[in-house]
Image (cartoon, helix red, strand yellow):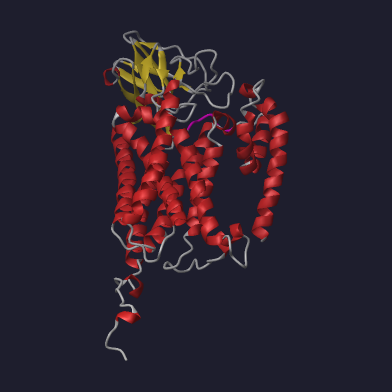
Amino acid sequence: MSERFVPVTWNTNKYIYDAVLLAGVFLYIWVFINFAPDYQTVTRAVSGTIYKARAFGSCAFLMLTLILCLGPLAKFDSRFLPLMYNRRHFGVLTCSVALVHAMYVIGIYFSFNPLYDKYVAVLGTNTNYGQLLGFPFESMGVLALLILVIMAVTSHDFWMRFLTPPLWKALHMLVYVAYAAGVIHVALGALQSETGPILPMIVGVSVAAVAGLHLAAALVDRRQMRQVAAAAQEGWLHAGTVDDIPDKRGLVVELGDGQRAAVFRYGNKLSALANACAHQNGPLGEGRVIGGCVTCPWHGFQYNPADGRAPAPFTEKVSTFRIRLDGDAILIDPNPLAPGTFVEPLVIGEPA
Amino acid sequence: MALVEGLEIYFWIGLGVSALFLTVGVDRVVEAARDSYIFRVLLIPGVIVLWPLVLIRWAMLESGREPSTRQRTHRSTHACVWILLAVLLPTALAGAMVLRAQGPMEAPAVLLEAPGAVGTQP
């Protein structure tokens, strides 16, 4: 995990994951190039090279759609969690496929522009931003690609550590902007150059799936979130009761100001940590206590529940919170302690 | 062309910053990077793309100024973004379908007879 950075941490699962990804991409490209021409209702004749450009472009769009579906799916059904495990390789491959699409498009449509350099021509040939029909949809593709590149080049764990998790996460949430730009790029580009029903159906189903899953995830998240009750005493907040937390599980509580904590029960002890994993902001409260450590459901990063520190030799640490018992009720101090600060676990049944 | 020239300048500055940061800075500000060299090659594109941000973070870490340790959740942002996109994206798609060209260019093709096959012409 973190004792020293290496280029890529490989293991058998990642080899399998990447092999399946690559096989899927090659299969899609092959099928598209060989069979899509039979089903396309284009308005003008399309060459084989253009089909290759479309194969890579549509592949990148579908890959991005799948990536965006994984998060909510893993939230609803833990069987999807293994797909989250190596999602960053999925993202880097998507960026690579999108780059190939861009190179084909530039080669086909902009290489012989008499006025501009071919790269300038991508944005300089059509500047009718004031109209929808004939809108320079290439600019939306460039925006989406730029964001994918930024995400790909900052995908190494180093960047999370160097930029801090909140900034890194904010940077990577630009993927939603990339997806929106991608949809507009397709809607005002490829959708306008053919008349058949297949492409609109694929794009429509993709958008409905991504938007529907994310809205449902946000709704479920809101319902599951335990809003802490008004201050019980001296600024402490009521997080729930001991019976609310199954053994070796966590209870996520909203503390206000956009901050969340997770109270974990393990045996007859209780401890509270920040809900965001120091690795990629994974939801620690949705993980389990395995081998005495809180284990992030996304990538398996572990933390000692008493001090929020990863077991040696790893160095990640998250904030801890002070908690106390008032009868069966768990009270939590909403002010986080510095990451890695030891807090004596509460023993259930003993007075605080 | 100014855009291309600007990007070229940005690239060369980024390359210079990456050379400086990855040989000097990274050891000073990220403990886990010490004695680990091969992975730095992977960081070069990121430093070139984000070099202004890299310089700001480097300066912050050198001076010991760290942002708040509070890890705010991104979930509320996520919900707002998807409420917005759930409206925007279907609207964009529906608009694109309305705009879809349905002019004569899309009329079904008609097979024309070859001139030699027309027997009634003089």
Task: Report the number of numbered marks.
Answer: 0
Can residue A344 be seen from the camera position used here? yes
* Location of residue A89 with respect to A323 vertically, above or below: below
Q: Residue at x 35, y 52 (%)?
A: A36
- Quadrant in which the C terminus of chain A appears: top left
The answer to which quarter of the image holds residue A86 is top left
Which of B21/A239 is in front?
B21
Q: Is residue A38 left or right of residue B41?
A: left
Seen as rendered, the residue at the extreme top is: A350
* Location of residue A151 with respect to A329 vertically, above or below: below
Query: Which x, y percent locates residue A197?
Result: 28, 58
Query: Which x, y percent locates residue A74?
Result: 33, 32
* Location of residue A233 with respect to B4 vertically, above or below: above
Can residue A256 be seen from the camera position used here? no
B38 falls in the magenta region: no
Q: Is residue B43 left or right of residue A316?
A: right
Which of A197/A314 is in front?
A197
Which of A13/A83 is in front?
A13
Name the main secondary structure of what is drawn in magenta: loop
Q: Residue at x 66, y 22 (%)?
A: B34
Query: Which x, y percent locates residue A350?
Result: 34, 8
The answer to which quarter of the image holds residue A334 is top left
Q: Residue at x 40, y 25 (%)?
A: A284
Q: Is residue A171 left or right of residue A44?
A: right
Q: Which residues make up the magenta segment? A: B67-71
Query: Which x, y percent locates residue A321?
Result: 45, 21
Q: Is residue B1 left or right of residue B95?
A: right
